[in-house]
């Protein structure tokens, strides 16, 4: 009886302490990042207290409190409050990818590889007709792979494609070659790569130019990995970059992660200019900055009205929003026009959307469906694992759901964003991938 009275008197305190303890245990015993997320704690407390008060008061409408709170937090995020994206993003991506790549090395260092002429298409052609042809081939390849993980895949000319590991290495190297030629890398140059993944691009530059780039990443696991290879690397948030901390460089490369750093809801103009100034501060005079970044396609739905979007579209947008902490740059010049304003001149700009689309298509099918099974497929064990990890990382469950390969071709939001769709008779992808090179 005394224990029951004590629980009734101090129940709220017990729930609070219990929630913190559970999150701490999951964070420090079950993740590599070891970052305690306040954003995750807010969500966890809302769930704990809603369950507690719903049980003690028998008012089960209180179970909806976490959903209401999520709506409030997402609104604040849209207004420009970032809700600790650094802690969320580092846990969400680094732990997820570290776990995946341990099981399948072909999936390591995911990038927007260069498939030009590899599968028989001109991937630079973004006409409606070519978009439809690539869509048809990609969907056929995807379904064949996930339904038969031992399937042999053929290009558009009915030529057998190389095995997954060879194809990935070939197309990655073609991308690296394209970028290096545009940058005109010379002996003695100082090079920085922001967000280097497993360090494949750094390896390529060292192998072909005998230069050791410096890396910068929010993932300590990635930093430790490239340091073992002999590269210098900084473990830090890109927003904390200063010349005093990392020095200055002749070339800065940022492939496939700028859009996650820039997302900022409504205050994008000042946000983008602020980041551009940070990059400018660590570029030497006439130094070059090369990015590959996703942009919202204004040709897809050229309206800001929510009523112009289907419920399916809004659901996928939410998954992207939640996973990325905000919106991509709007339009093909959504970032570059603000970079230009602070003095970064555009030297090269090319649409490479199909590179990302085909890579993502292969990632969810041919690359991950090998030896009779698909790694990124649903199971109750994998769902339970994701739910537990969400206790530590607020968006981990979103990441897990976003990468599930299913027979619904465009279920996965990270694939859907590049899949061409029929809009008023024209085949158009919701998002685009832009290659842009600036000079200081």
Image (tube, grey):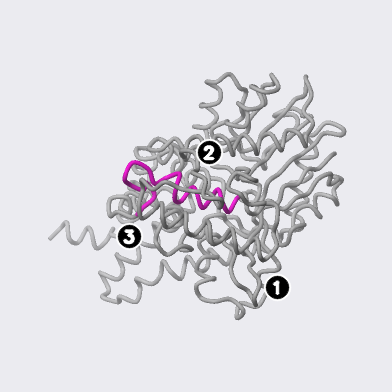
Q: What residue lies at 77% left-to-right and 57% top-to-bottom?
A: 333
Determine if the magenta segment contains residue 360: yes
Q: Is the N terminus in the top left, top right, bottom left or bottom right quadrant?
A: bottom left
For discs 1 and 2, the disc positioned in front in the rendered view = 2
**In the displayed structure, does residue 159 sit left or right of residue 103?**
right
Q: Up-down: is 94 above or below 85?
A: above
Q: How many marks?
A: 3
Viewer-proximal residue, 257 or 166? 166
Residue 130 percent location from the top left of the image: 65, 61
Q: Is residue 270 left or right of residue 354?
A: right
User: Which of the two discs, 1 and 2, labels the residue nearer the N terminus?
Assistant: 2
Q: Is residue 78 magenta?
A: no
Residue 168 numbered mark, or none: 2
Residue 114: give x, y in percent of width and height. 63, 43
Label 3 Cα neighbours within 10 Å, binned few <14 / some 14-19 / many ≥20? some
**Residue at (80%, 36%) from the top-left corner?**
288
The residue labelled by disc 3 is: 12
Where does label 1 land, which residue?
A: 302
SS at mark 1 in the image: loop
Q: Which residues are magenta?
A: 356-377
């Amino acid at each position: 009886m005394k224990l029951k009275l004590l629980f009734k008197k101090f129940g709220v305190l017990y729930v609070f302490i219990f929630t913190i303890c559970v999150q701490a245990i999951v964070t420090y015993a079950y993740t590599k990042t070891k970052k305690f997320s306040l954003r995750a704690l807010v969500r966890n407390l809302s769930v704990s207290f809603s369950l507690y008060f719903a049980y003690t008061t028998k008012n089960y409408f209180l179970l909806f409190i976490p959903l209401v709170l999520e709506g409030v937090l997402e609104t604040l995020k849209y207004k420009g409050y970032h809700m600790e994206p650094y802690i969320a993003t580092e846990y969400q991506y680094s732990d997820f990818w570290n776990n995946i790549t341990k099981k399948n090395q072909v999936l390591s260092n995911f990038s927007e590889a260069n498939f030009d002429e590899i599968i028989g298409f001109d991937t630079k052609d973004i006409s409606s007709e070519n978009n439809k042809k690539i869509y048809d081939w990609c969907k056929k390849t995807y379904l064949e792979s996930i339904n038969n993980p031992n399937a042999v895949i053929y290009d558009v000319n009915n030529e057998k494609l190389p095995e997954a590991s060879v194809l990935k290495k070939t197309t990655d190297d073609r991308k690296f070659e394209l970028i290096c030629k545009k940058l005109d890398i010379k002996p003695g140059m100082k090079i920085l790569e922001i967000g280097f993944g497993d360090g494949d691009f750094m390896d390529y530059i060292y192998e072909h130019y005998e230069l050791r780039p410096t890396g910068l990443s929010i993932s300590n696991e990635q930093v430790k990995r490239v340091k073992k290879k002999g590269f210098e690397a900084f473990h830090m948030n890109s927003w904390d970059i200063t010349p005093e901390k990392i020095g200055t460089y002749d070339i800065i490369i940022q492939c496939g992660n700028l859009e996650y750093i820039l997302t900022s809801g409504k205050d994008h103009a000042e946000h983008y200019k602020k980041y551009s100034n940070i990059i400018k501060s660590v570029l030497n005079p006439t130094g070059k900055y090369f990015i590959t970044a996703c942009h919202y396609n204004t040709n897809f739905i050229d309206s800001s009205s929510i009523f112009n979007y289907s419920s399916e579209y809004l659901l996928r947008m939410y998954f992207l929003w939640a996973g990325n902490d905000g919106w991509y740059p709007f339009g093909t010049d959504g970032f570059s026009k603000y970079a230009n304003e602070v003095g970064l001149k555009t030297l090269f700009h090319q649409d490479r959307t199909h590179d990302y689309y085909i890579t993502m298509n292969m990632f969810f099918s041919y690359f991950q469906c090998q030896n009779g099974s698909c790694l990124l497929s649903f199971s109750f064990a994998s769902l339970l694992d994701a739910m537990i990890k969400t206790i530590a990382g607020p968006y981990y469950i979103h990441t897990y759901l976003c990468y599930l390969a299913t027979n619904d071709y465009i279920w996965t939001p990270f694939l859907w964003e590049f899949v061409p769709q029929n809009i008023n008779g024209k085949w158009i992808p919701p998002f685009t991938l832009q290659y842009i090179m600036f000079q200081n």
